[in-house]
Image: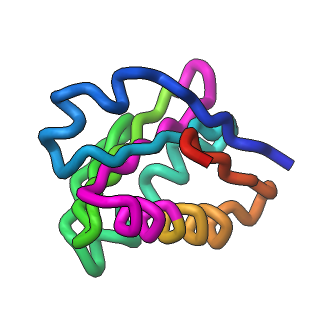
Amino acid sequence: MTTSVPTNQPELSSQSTQSQVGPFATETIIQSEHASKYLTVLCRHFARKVDAKWNETSGTVYFPVGVTTMTVNDEANLLTIQCVSDNKQQLEHQKRIISEHIDTYSRRETIEVCWSND
């Protein structure tokens, strides 16, 4: 089983992150040899319903409840996911969407997602 690592990094509450959508933010880091696959699969899936842009190393998904950004570090096999919203309820909804989809697409391994504000 793979467990994501929550981070308590101050840049999550920085002015640049807040200006994207809102003041509520959280982050998780998933270590997996399939990190880049997860980024592509998640962004491609979400793009069917909402605006999403991605490449091999990063992606941004524009949900009605906030913005999710994903970044891959291939050398360390890490997928960093940041969610930013206008309020706590929207942030919780966004976290639930991401966590459920990671669970759905991580067939080769079990990933327990741990968010920085849990």
Name the quadrant containing residue 4.
Answer: top right
Q: Is residue 89 magenta?
A: yes
Question: Where is residue 85 drawn, in percent x and y?
Answer: 29, 55
Please give the name of the residue rendered at 62% of the width and 36% of the height, measured from the top-left corner: 6
On the question of residue 46 being in view, the answer is yes
Question: Where is residue 97 drawn, in percent x and y?
Answer: 48, 70
Task: Name the foreground residue: 18 vs 33.
Answer: 18
Instruction: Locate residue 70 relative to residue 103 in the image: left or right.
Output: left
Q: Is residue 16 above or below residue 20?
A: above
Question: Where is residue 1 drawn, in percent x and y?
Answer: 86, 49
Please give the name of the residue rendered at 56% of the width and 39% of the height, measured from the top-left corner: 116
Please give the name of the residue rendered at 55% of the width and 44% of the height, measured from the top-left corner: 117
Q: Is residue 62 above or below residue 19?
A: below
Instruction: Locate residue 35 relative to residue 91 in the image: left or right.
Output: right
Question: Where is residue 83 drawn, in percent x and y?
Answer: 38, 49
On the question of residue 42 being in view, the answer is no
**Colouring scheme applied when the structure was drawn:** rainbow
Instruction: Locate residue 20 relative to residue 33 in the image: left or right.
Output: left
Name the quadrant containing residue 50.
Answer: bottom left
Question: What count of labels does the image hold?
Answer: 0
Task: State which region is magenta.
Answer: 74-95
Q: Is residue 62 magenta?
A: no
Residue found at the very far bottom of the displayed protein: 49
Residue found at the very far left of the displayed protein: 19
Task: Name the foreground residue: 8 vs 45.
Answer: 8
Task: Name the foreground residue: 89 vs 58.
Answer: 89
Please give the name of the residue rendered at 49% of the width and 36% of the height, measured from the top-left corner: 80
Q: Is residue 93 above or below residue 113?
A: below
